[in-house]
Image: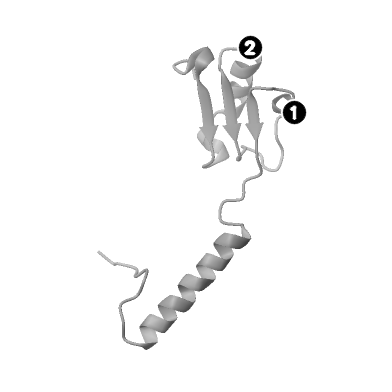
Amino acid sequence: MMALGRGGVIINVGRGALVDEKKMVQFLVEGNLGGAGLDVFEDEPNVPKELYKMDNVVLSPHKAVLTPESFEAMGDLVLANLKAFFSNEPLLSPVKND
């Protein structure tokens, strides 16, 4: 965070524990970090209260694959793989055991 400095922005959409959240909040409060974009948190669903008040922070609920579009796409892929398997055709998404 020190390397990012006042003009830097942290984006975390992976896992809450990837970023030291307490340190990030401290850096943001003290003005030593330019901003943050977050959809994951260390103690989900609890979000540090300080982040709600900051204009330089964007918070979003972590949806990952939990969207109607992704569920539909996964269902379509499963059906296409089943069709390919029972037609003796190559699978669309084979699991390789290398």
Instruction: Check disc 2 and give the amino acid type.
Output: Glu
Horizontal side, residue 20 vs residue 58: left or right: left
Q: Residue at x 44, y 16 (%)?
A: 3
Instruction: Check disc 1 and give the amino acid type.
Output: Lys
Query: Is the image coloured rainbow, by chain, by secondary structure, or in one colour?
Result: one colour
Q: Quadrant of the C terminus?
A: bottom left
For residue 59, which quarter of the picture?
A: top right
Name the N-terminal-most of marks 1 and 2.
Answer: 2
The reply to whether the C-beta atoms of the residues labelled 1 and 2 are less than 8 Å apart is no
Residue 45 screen position, x and y as percent: 70, 43
> 78 or 22, which is in the foreground?
78
Residue 40 screen position, x and y as percent: 60, 40
Q: Residue at x 61, y 57 (%)?
A: 66
Q: Is residue 47 above or below residue 33?
A: below
Residue 88 screen position, x and y as percent: 31, 86
Q: Which mark is residue 30?
A: 2
Horizontal side, residue 85 vs residue 17: left or right: left
* Neighbour tally class for label 1: few under 14, some 14-19, many 20 plus, Cα within 10 Å: few
> 41 or 80, which is in the foreground?
80
For residue 53, which quarter of the picture?
A: top right
Horizontal side, residue 45 vs residue 41: left or right: right
* Neighbour tally class for label 2: few under 14, some 14-19, many 20 plus, Cα within 10 Å: few
Q: Residue at x 37, y 81 (%)?
A: 84
Q: Residue furthest bottom?
A: 87
Q: Return the residue at label 1.
A: 49
Q: Which mark is residue 1?
A: none
